Image: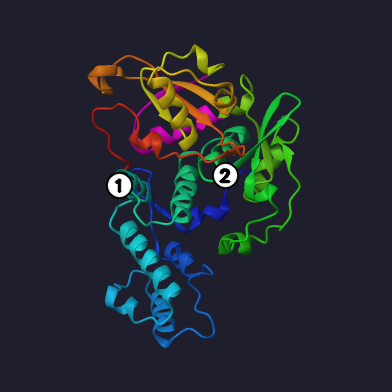
Amino acid sequence: MTDFWLSCGYHFLDRDEGGGYVVTDDFLKVYLARPELLPPPNACPVERSLHSALLADPRRPVAASEIQTITDADARENWQLLIAFRDHLLAHKTLEASYVDLIRRGVGKTPPLFINQLVHAILRNALDTTADPSTLRAGELFFRTQRITLHEGSLIAADEETVAGGSQLPVSPLVSMLGLPADSEIEVLNESNASTYWQRSDRFDMALDLTAGREGVAALAKAMERWISHLLGLEVAIEPLPELREAPVSWYVGLDAEATRIADTLWNGEELDEDAMARVVGLFRLTFRDARLMTDDVRGEPIYLVLAMTSERLIRMKPQNLVTGLPVKHIEAVS
């Protein structure tokens, strides 16, 4: 078995001629199966009727006035968010184009859960032909929070939700459909167990060694290359670097909020304290295959990518920064 990430719902999506994912009715119906949208026994007739109508026709227009007649305030908010998100998806040719447009315009009130689900599916498409489990495991950082543990001098990233024993939030209906176990044993991905990643990829129970100079950071670099190529059509090379001190920062992209703060400090010519240095998990140098695509002020210069953990040792990666933060003249999403 070499399939992976079934829980992103990619099997409910079609592909267009350019390889982008196209939204289908079945994909939209998965959202209607979420616990937040399933009308409870005491739901008002309007909410029950709306849910039934959308199950029959998930593209059915829904007016704001219709949602306002739902009795329960929390239900009204959930429906407002879902319909706004659905309408955004349907306004674009592909899932990829809808994501890039959402990121460039600003996510507004779009729930982070919806953003992460988009990233999960789009990255599944970008990595579709990848045969390396390490690259796939590194890709999990794009859409799932990681907890870092220092073990015998190594930086080990494990899925935060799995480490915590499961989230208090309702799980995806797709995860429930797959019958995944509530509790999973975590083991570090290595050469001897890599072949098991395929059948357990939706359990998120394999940890990744992100120690500088090891395979994990190189795998993350590969995943980022594929992400940029798939979404922006840009061919880049990303190389892990051993230390932040070795990098003259001329242009940088923080891959998370903490990394952006640290890189800002360097950009302003300030010294980093040891605590900040210790929170840097990864440093990467990005170069364009075709430097002519770069803006004139930095053409031919390397771009630095910084990944860091919070003081609580959590990594909350923001892959959207790779879409909006690169110094390019003009880029378009896969349409």
- The residue to which callout 2 is attached is 145
Q: What main secondary structure does the magenta stretch of the protein show?
A: helix
The magenta stretch spans residue 254: no
User: Image quarter for residue 139?
Assistant: top right
> What residue type is disc 1 on?
Asp
Mark 1 nearby-residue class (10 Å; few <14, some 14–19, many ≥20) = some
Q: Secondary structure at mark 2?
A: loop
Residue 45 seen in render = yes
Which marked residue is nearer to the observer: mark 2 or mark 1?
Answer: 2
Whether residue 230 appears in magenta in the rendering, the answer is yes
Q: Is residue 277 above or below residue 84?
A: above
* Left or right: 111 as drawn, with respect to 293: right
Give the percent coordinates (x, y) of residue 62: 30, 73
Q: Which mark is residue 101?
A: 1
Could you say which quadrant of the image residue 251 lies in? Answer: top left
Query: What's the residue at 42%, 87% (across, down)?
Result: 45
Span colored in magenta: 220-240
Q: Indicate the position of residue 87 as horizontal and vertical percent values.
A: 31, 62
Q: Is residue 23 above or below residue 323?
A: below
- Label 2 sits on what residue type? Thr
**Is residue 63 shown to the viewer in this render?**
no
